[in-house]
Each structure stands twice: as C-alpha cells, then as structure tokens.
Image (tube, grey):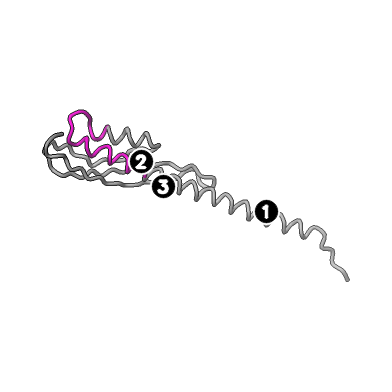
C-alpha cells in the first residue's frame, strides 16, 4: 500500500521559510541594539569631553555642554556629574546617556552608556 505524500514538501518549505524569517528578524533586532549601544557610547564620550572643560570656564555650563553634545549624537543625557570648579585642579566628569532602539519583536529597548573624562586645566591660563 502506497501512502500519498503530496504536499509534504510544501509544508516543510513553509516551516523552513518561517524559521528563516524569525532568524532574520532576530538578527535585525540584535543589530538595532548593537547600533544603539554604539550611538549611546559615542554620545556619552562626546558629552563627557564637552562637559569637562566647561567645569573650569565661565562661558558655558557643563550640564548644557553635555546635553548639547549628547543630543547632537542622537542620545538623551540621563545624568551628568560635572561640578563647576574654577580652581586649577584636576577634575573628572562622568555622564550617562540613553538611546532608544526600536525593535521588531519588542516595541523598544533603551540602551544606556556611561563615560568619564578627566580635565587638567593649564596652570598658566583658562
């Protein structure tokens, strides 16, 4: 007795196509998170570097400088530990930024990054 196997290959093909589609979507989501992580870290580095000298000068607020630089790099400044100190002391600025990654399998994921910059004022001037 011979069994009818017509359509078995079609069912298997649909299952394989579904698995490939899910793997593709997962790869897209992973790349979106990695991209957001890179953007957030770049923004945090730039914000810390912008805020560090602003802790010493009179022209700008370090928080404003960090916020501006984070936003210019597509991120949101979460916090900035950037105390103003007009004395010629070494100081460290720490910032945290956030970038939202929009995904296919989930609505969105917020990726955070921190960075630190050290500023050493030149003793002879500002």
Left-right relation of 6 to 97: right
The alpha-carbon separation of the residues under discs 3 and 2 comes to 10 Å
What x and y, as percent, mark residue 1?
A: 88, 71
What x and y, as percent, mark residue 47?
A: 30, 39
Do labels 1 and 2 touch, CB within 8 Å?
no
Q: Is residue 116 magenta?
A: no
Circle 2 is placed at which residue position? 43
Mark 2 element type: helix
Mark 1 element type: helix
The alpha-carbon separation of the residues under discs 1 and 3 comes to 30 Å
Residue 53 vs residue 106, the one in the foreground: 53
What x and y, as percent, mark residue 21?
A: 62, 51
Left-right relation of 47 to 126: right
Count of numbered labels shown in the rendering: 3
- Sequence order check, earlier mark of 3 and 2: 3
Marking on residue 37: 3
Left-right relation of 11 to 66: right
Main structural element of the magenta stretch: helix, strand or loop?
helix
- Sequence order check, earlier mark of 1 and 2: 1
Which residue is pictured at 59% across the width and 51% down the height?
24
Mark 3 element type: helix
Q: Which residues are magenta?
A: 42-64
123 above or below 28?
A: above
Residue 25 vs residue 38, the one in the foreground: 38
56 above or below 27?
A: above
Residue furthest bottom in the image: 1
Left-right relation of 55 to 73: left
Which residue is pictured at 54% across the width and 51% down the height?
27
Circle 1 is placed at which residue position? 17
Do labels 3 and 2 touch, CB within 8 Å?
no
Which residue is pictured at 15% across the width and 34% down the height?
126
């Amino acid at each position: 007795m011979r069994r009818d196997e017509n359509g078995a290959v079609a069912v298997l093909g649909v299952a394989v196509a579904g698995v490939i589609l899910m793997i593709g979507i997962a790869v897209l989501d992973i790349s979106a998170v990695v991209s957001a992580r890179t953007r957030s870290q770049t923004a945090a580095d730039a914000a810390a570097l912008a805020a560090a000298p602003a802790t010493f000068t009179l022209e700008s607020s370090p928080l404003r400088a960090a916020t501006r630089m984070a936003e210019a790099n597509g991120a949101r400044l979460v916090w900035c530990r950037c105390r103003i100190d007009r004395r010629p002391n070494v100081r460290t600025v720490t910032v945290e930024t956030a970038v939202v990654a929009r995904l296919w399998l989930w609505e969105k994921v917020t990726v955070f990054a921190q960075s630190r910059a050290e500023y050493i004022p030149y003793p002879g001037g500002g």
